[in-house]
Amino acid sequence: MPRQILQVSRVSQGQRLDKFLSETALWPSRSFVQKIIEAGGVSHQGVVLKANYRLQENDEIEINWSEPRALEVLPQKIPLDILFEDQDLIVVNKPRQMVVHPAAGNYQGTLVNALLDHCRDLSGIGGVIRPGIVHRLDKDTSGILVVAKNDFAHLELANQIKVRSMKRVYQLLVHGSPPDSGQINYPLGRHPVERKKIAVVAKGKPAVTHFQVLERIGAYTFLEARLETGRTHQIRVHFSYLGYPLVGDQVYGHHKERVPLKGQALHAVLLGFIHPRTGHYLEFTAAVPTVMQEALAWCRRNG
């Protein structure tokens, strides 16, 4: 069973325990931390702590958690577009229509199934369902993502996302004519009524998207967007909120779409990060897929 001891500094005095542990980036998510706390895995001087415990300077917090169970998701021989691979990580260009990891009712045909067949040695931090998964792309979003092969790489990459140093650039096609460039800074959280959706909410988590127009095509605009934060559905919700929904987005966009494209026109075109072991900066690019190029060509003819 892994064990970690953290000493609280003056800067963190008064902070909630769960927030403090989440911000260390030693674990992949706040929900993961919450499970450790709920299982009684966090203590101070032998006393088990709750999530709302307020830290005191010089507290020695002991954290114990169980190793992830043996993987139960089955490997599947599915072709992968691998851009880079070494002992620590693998960078892939995910196709549209592929789910990143298994979920209820969808345990086959995912990127995780394909990766388990390809390398078998993914990080266990994400648990049984999400081994090695540091960040995700929607099913209908194509493009680049990095997967960790071990816990060391996973924690280092997760920290780069946390401190906003990982470079993530997308290309997208939207309805309307947004400004030539700008920054979208609206907090995001669960929709107050439709709980499966994300929305701009006053008390949501900070979310920042930078964008620049690449091409104006009649009633449509082709853009490049860079994530400063990486909230669920961030790009889709931000542009929809401003009145420029993504072409093909059936959740946040127009329900009746003229452009012949199944799924939203969104592609993760560039990913850059510091290699966890070597310290070298790596950057990868992948051109938009054929179906999105065809949608752009249709807009140029009919926009």
Image (spheres, rainbow, N blue to C red):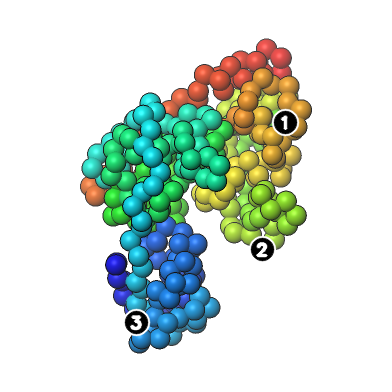
User: What amino acid is found at the position of numbered circle 2 in the picture?
Assistant: Lys
Asked whether, in this view, residue 259 is left or right of residue 103, the answer is right
Please name the residue shown 29% across and 67% down the image. 1
User: What amino acid is found at the position of numbered circle 1 in the picture?
Assistant: Gly
Please name the residue shown 61% across and 20% down the image. 296
Q: Earlier in the sequence, mark 3 or mark 1?
A: 3
Please name the residue shown 64% across and 59% down the image. 204
Q: Earlier in the sequence, mark 3 or mark 2?
A: 3
Dot 2 corresponds to which residue? Answer: 203
Residue 176, labelled with which disc? 1
Residue 123 image offset from top left, x and y in percent: 33, 50
- Pointer 3 local density, CA inside 10 Å: few below 14, some 14–19, many at least 20: some
Q: Which element type, helix, strand or loop, lies under badge 2?
A: loop
Q: Which element type, helix, strand or loop, lies under badge 1?
A: loop
Which quarter of the rendered picture does the C terminus lie within?
top right
Residue 70 image offset from top left, x and y in percent: 33, 52
Viewer-nearest of discs 3 and 1: 3
Q: Are marks 3 and 1 in contact (CB under 8 Å)?
A: no
- Pointer 1 local density, CA inside 10 Å: few below 14, some 14–19, many at least 20: some
User: In this rendering, is residue 268 above or below 203?
Assistant: above
Viewer-nearest of discs 3 and 2: 3
Dot 3 corresponds to which residue? Answer: 60
